[in-house]
Image (spheres, coloured by chain):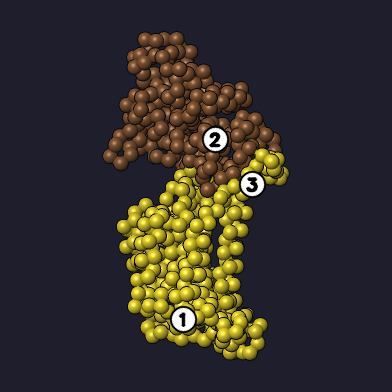
Chain colours: A yellow, B brown
């Protein structure tokens, strides 16, 4: 049995789901508009690369949350704790393998980095499964309780991190070959790790797009985000799908935690909660349940944060709130609204 | 009734504090179209949603093909062989026509034979096969919604007001498609306000009022009895064509 071929090409407007280019052009325009304000091209490049790296990490952390929002209408304030747990679990690799971290061997550096990612994703995925079962499942359809209970879960796990790893911030070092910067041109440099973060973010984005657009599971997730009731009426158990998405989203948050931890080079139990504000802004700006919106929203938020931090540090803290306000006044359901939300 | 495919016995449904279905007794015989008529708010949509398990029956029994499905989850009811075409169509507008059909074909990949049958009923879907379903017209969306229910063999198809808000020409095409479905031997429980369509398609009819079935019988009898029509529906079918 094979999938029946599409009808003749002349009759089909293939790929006709039109891409809304406006938010993409807007993001590029924001970046270009910052150039004359920053003044120096090399500084602008550095800020832009930093913004892209930060945006990719926020996207990785936020993508799971937006699907959880979209698929089951669950407001999970506990999402931040998966980021913290992911970062701390990487210590289980970094401490015993500190020799690999400080080795000049690129292979060992990459190896320890990948081991951190794999262990953290496995741990946070498993933790996400337990979190959904124990904390989220009893409060489906009850938004206020979801906020209270998931926030409570976040506080409990943060305290457990203090119990296991102590209350003091823990500093970590980047693997040797990830340190330093590379020249992009005369007077222009970009930190190696930021470029690595961009690369990892692109890999995750491509993987998600392939899964969402080329697999039956992906189709179900997209359909479920739009109309979970109809997915059930077609004979699919949306709850099982949701658990899978929750686990995958938790694992992605764990991956984001590893990347964010190396980026900050300091781990605290509250690091997930700190970045959670940005993640919620991204999810709201992007449109609940929209992966494309989450990606563009992440880049927009990160770029604006970096430019304003350079140009006017005093308003950097509120710049993203302002950005969210402007976007929602323009598009009240986010940059890429999903039908049904 | 020995040939009953679906039976509702004393079904009550509450939505919040509202008591919508107040003891529905309904038999849908195997094969043919059963039409569910009634004024707005009589409980027709609630009946279909309760059968699908989208709203839970608070009392009573729903039997499908001899099995009690009253408390079964919606996906299990669908897997048992009931397809549902809701009033608002509920197509996945972010997915293409093809993707909508792929999801509905639970048994596996779309087969050319199945698609050809769908395209023969609804040619517009062939033209817009690769188009995002959200870009279709209202009539085309309704066709897609019905096509999703037909892409796999189902024992029973529940359809909620498929002609509502459609242009007369599209309604005519829709009736033609339903006749083909009927010829193929499908069992359909159809909620319909368009009495011309109801009369042309219906084999049996049930009339609802205030959350109960107040009449059940052959469609031909109701169509011929103006006094009965007036008593049950407050109108004559002939005046609503």
- Counting from the top left corner in percent of width and height, residue A174 is at 54, 84
Q: Residue at x 40, y 39 (%)?
A: B55
Instruction: Compare residues A34 and B231 and report the one nearer the observer.
Output: A34
Query: Which quadrant holds residue A321?
Result: bottom left
For disc 2, the marked residue is B140
Residue B146 vertical placement versus A88 (above, below): above
Q: Nearer the viewer, mark 1 or mark 2?
A: 2
Quarter of the rendering containing residue B57 = top left
Assign a secondary structure to mark 3: loop
Q: Which mark is residue A14?
A: 3
Disc sitting over residue A264 in the figure: 1
Viewed as shown, does residue B211 lie left or right of A38?
Answer: left
Q: What chain is tagged by disc 3?
A: A
Q: On screen, B111 above or below A35?
A: above
Q: Pointer 1 indicates a residue of which chain?
A: A
Residue at 62% x, 32% y: name it: B123
Q: Is residue A148 left or right of residue A116?
A: left
Q: x, y (%) of residue B186?
A: 58, 27
Q: Are marks 1 and 3 in contact (CB under 8 Å)?
A: no
Q: Position of residue B171 (x, y in %)?
A: 51, 25
Where A329 falls versus A99 (above or below)? above
Dot 1 lies on which element? helix
Label 1 to label 3, Cα distance in Å? 44 Å
Labels 1, 3: one chain = yes
A13 to the left or right of B200: right
Q: SS class of the residue under badge 2?
A: helix
| Extreme residue in the left direction | B17
Residue B125 seen by the camera: yes
Instruction: Look at discs 1 and 3 and give the one toward the viewer.
Output: 3
Q: Nearer the viewer, residue B142 or A110?
A: B142
Number of the label disc, if any, that sits on residue A68: none
Q: Position of residue A75 (x, y in %)?
A: 38, 59
């Amino acid at each position: 049995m094979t999938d029946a071929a599409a009808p003749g090409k002349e009759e089909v407007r293939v790929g006709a789901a039109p891409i809304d280019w406006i938010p993409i052009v807007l993001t590029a325009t924001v970046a270009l508009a910052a150039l004359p304000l920053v003044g120096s091209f090399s500084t602008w490049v550095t800020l832009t690369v930093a913004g892209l790296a930060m945006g990719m990490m926020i996207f990785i952390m936020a993508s799971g949350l937006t699907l959880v929002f979209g698929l089951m209408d669950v407001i999970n304030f506990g999402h931040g704790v998966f980021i913290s747990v992911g970062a701390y679990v990487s210590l289980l690799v970094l401490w015993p393998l500190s020799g690999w971290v400080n080795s000049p061997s690129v292979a060992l550096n990459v190896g320890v980095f990948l081991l951190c990612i794999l262990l953290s994703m496995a741990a946070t995925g498993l933790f996400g499964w337990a979190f959904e079962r124990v904390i989220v499942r009893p409060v489906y359809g009850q938004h206020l309780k979801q906020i209270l209970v998931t926030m409570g879960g976040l506080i409990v796990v943060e305290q457990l991190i203090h119990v296991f790893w102590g209350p003091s911030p823990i500093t970590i070092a980047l693997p040797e070959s990830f340190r330093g910067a590379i020249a992009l041109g005369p007077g222009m440099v970009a930190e190696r790790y930021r470029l690595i973060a961009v690369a990892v973010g692109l890999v995750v984005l491509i993987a998600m797009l392939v899964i969402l657009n080329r697999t039956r599971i992906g189709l179900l997730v997209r359909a479920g985000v739009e109309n979970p009731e109809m997915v059930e009426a077609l004979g699919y158990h949306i709850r099982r799908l949701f658990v899978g998405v929750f686990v995958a989203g938790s694992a992605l948050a764990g991956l984001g935690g590893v990347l964010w931890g190396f980026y900050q080079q300091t781990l605290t139990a509250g690091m997930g909660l700190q970045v959670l504000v940005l993640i919620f802004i991204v999810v709201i700006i992007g449109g609940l349940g929209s992966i494309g919106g989450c990606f563009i929203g992440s880049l927009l938020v990160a770029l604006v944060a970096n430019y304003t931090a350079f140009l006017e540090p005093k308003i950097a803290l509120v710049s993203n709130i302002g950005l969210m306000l402007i976007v929602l006044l323009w598009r009240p359901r986010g940059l890429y609204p999903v039908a049904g939300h | 009734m020995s040939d009953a495919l679906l039976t509702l016995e004393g079904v009550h449904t509450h939505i919040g504090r509202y008591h919508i279905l107040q003891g529905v007794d309904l038999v849908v015989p195997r094969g043919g179209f059963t039409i569910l008529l009634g004024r707005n708010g009589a409980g027709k949509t609630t009946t279909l949603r309760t059968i699908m398990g989208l709203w839970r029956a608070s009392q009573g029994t729903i039997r499908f093909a001899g099995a009690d499905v009253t408390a079964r989850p919606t996906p299990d009811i669908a897997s048992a062989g009931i397809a549902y075409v809701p009033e608002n169509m509920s197509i996945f507008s972010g997915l293409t026509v093809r993707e909508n059909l792929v999801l509905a074909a639970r048994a596996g990949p779309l087969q050319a034979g199945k698609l050809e049958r769908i395209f023969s009923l609804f040619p517009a879907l062939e033209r817009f096969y690769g188009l995002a379903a959200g870009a279709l017209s209202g009539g085309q969306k309704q066709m897609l919604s019905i096509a999703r229910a037909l892409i796999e063999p189902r024992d029973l198809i529940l359809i909620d007001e498929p002609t509502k808000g459609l242009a007369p020409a599209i309604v005519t095409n829709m009736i033609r498609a339903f006749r083909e479905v009927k010829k193929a031997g499908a069992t359909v429980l159809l909620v319909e306000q368009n009495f011309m369509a109801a009369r042309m398609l219906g084999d049996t009819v049930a009339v609802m009022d205030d959350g109960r079935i107040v009449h059940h019988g052959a469609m031909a009898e109701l169509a011929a009895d103006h006094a009965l029509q007036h008593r049950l529906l407050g109108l004559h079918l002939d005046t609503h064509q």
